[in-house]
Amino acid sequence: MSMRRLLLVLVLLAGCVIGADRGAAWLAARLVATRVQSTEHLAQRPRVLVHGTPFLPQVVRGRYQAVEVWALDLRPEPLPVAEVDATLTGVRLPLGDVLRRSVSQVDADSVRARVMLRYGDLNTYLAGRNLSVAAAGPSLRVTGTARVLGRDFSAAAVSDVAVRDGQVVVTAHRIETGNSLADAALSAAADARRLDFTVRLGSLPFGLRLTDVRVQPDGLVLTADARAVVVNTG
């Protein structure tokens, strides 16, 4: 065989291997997406990306370095979640399930995720308390009413946001009414707590538990994690 033909054969073989590699990654990703959508009762199939190359050895072993899952527009009561971007590490998906194109269970050693809450959804959630929120740099601005000396004032609070015991806790540290005397009185008054609130999210995918929160211009970005995750037929 001439050198030219040998090189052509090698190129074709390499192309077949790469094609099979990518095809295996696509199939594994699709199987995981279908299982996650079914188990977590998602309205639309999440986008799934299998990390790490080459893929074929991972498929054969049935163990994947990392699998990233994007799920949009989740509706856990009482508050919608705009987006969950989760990375599962140490994922186990048996080769037999891949070959049969049927997954009964997906296991992962751990999950770390970014959870987005939009201000529009938060404001709908808070409408019953006549509160609304917006970003104020690293803090949250909460607008509503507060009472001092038996009188209600329209007020805004510059508030701290934290995660405590798996809940989002918003606490005013400065009250603003446009009246300096009222501001000082409200900031010190127990009734200024009317501008504080707590959000307990509904069930998140993979049993995620909130660990941290940051204020962003378009919403609250939460960090969440979970360990020893099992996604099965439920």
Image (spheres, helix red, strand yellow):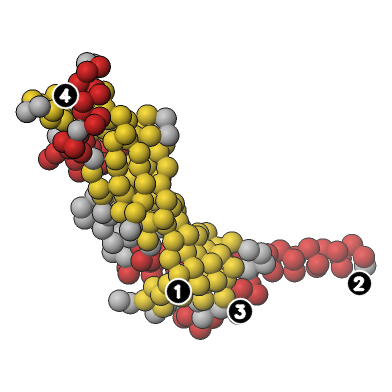
Mark 3 / mark 4, whichever is N-terminal: 3
Viewer-side label of 4, 1: 4
Label 2 to label 3: alpha-carbon separation: 33 Å
Q: Is residue 230 left or right of residue 147?
A: right
CA gap between label 3 and label 4 equals: 64 Å
* Outermost top residue: 179
The residue wearing badge 1 is 228
Q: Which comes before the other along the chain, label 2 or label 3?
A: 2
Q: Which mark is residue 60?
A: 3
Q: Earlier in the sequence, mark 1 or mark 3?
A: 3
- In percent of width and height, residue 151 lies at 8, 25
How many residues crowd around disc 3 within 10 Å: few (fewer than 14), some, or many (20 or more)? Answer: some
Q: Is tag 4's residue or tag 1's residue first in the polypeptide sequence?
A: 4
* Residue denoted by label 2: 1
Q: Observer-nearest residue: 73 or 5?
A: 73
Measured in 3D between alpha carbons, the distance from the residue under mark 2 to the one under mark 1, in whole angstroms, is 54 Å
Q: CA distance from mark 1 to mark 3?
A: 22 Å
Q: Secondary structure at mark 3?
A: helix
Report crowding for label 4: few under 14, some 14 to 19, many 20 or more residues within 10 A (C-alpha): few
Q: Are marks 2 and 3 in contact (CB under 8 Å)?
A: no
Quarter of the rendering occupied by the N terminus: bottom right
Answer above or below: position of 13 versus 218.
Answer: below
Q: Of the two numbered discs 2 and 4 on the same chain, state the one appearing first in sequence.
A: 2
| Location of the C terminus (image quadrant) | bottom left
Callout 2 secondary element: loop
Residue 10 disc label: none
Earlier residue among tags 2 and 1: 2
Where is residue 180 drawn, in percent x and y? 25, 17
Q: Which residue is mark 4?
A: 154
Of the two numbered discs 2 and 1 in the rendering, the one whose residue sits closer to the viewer: 1
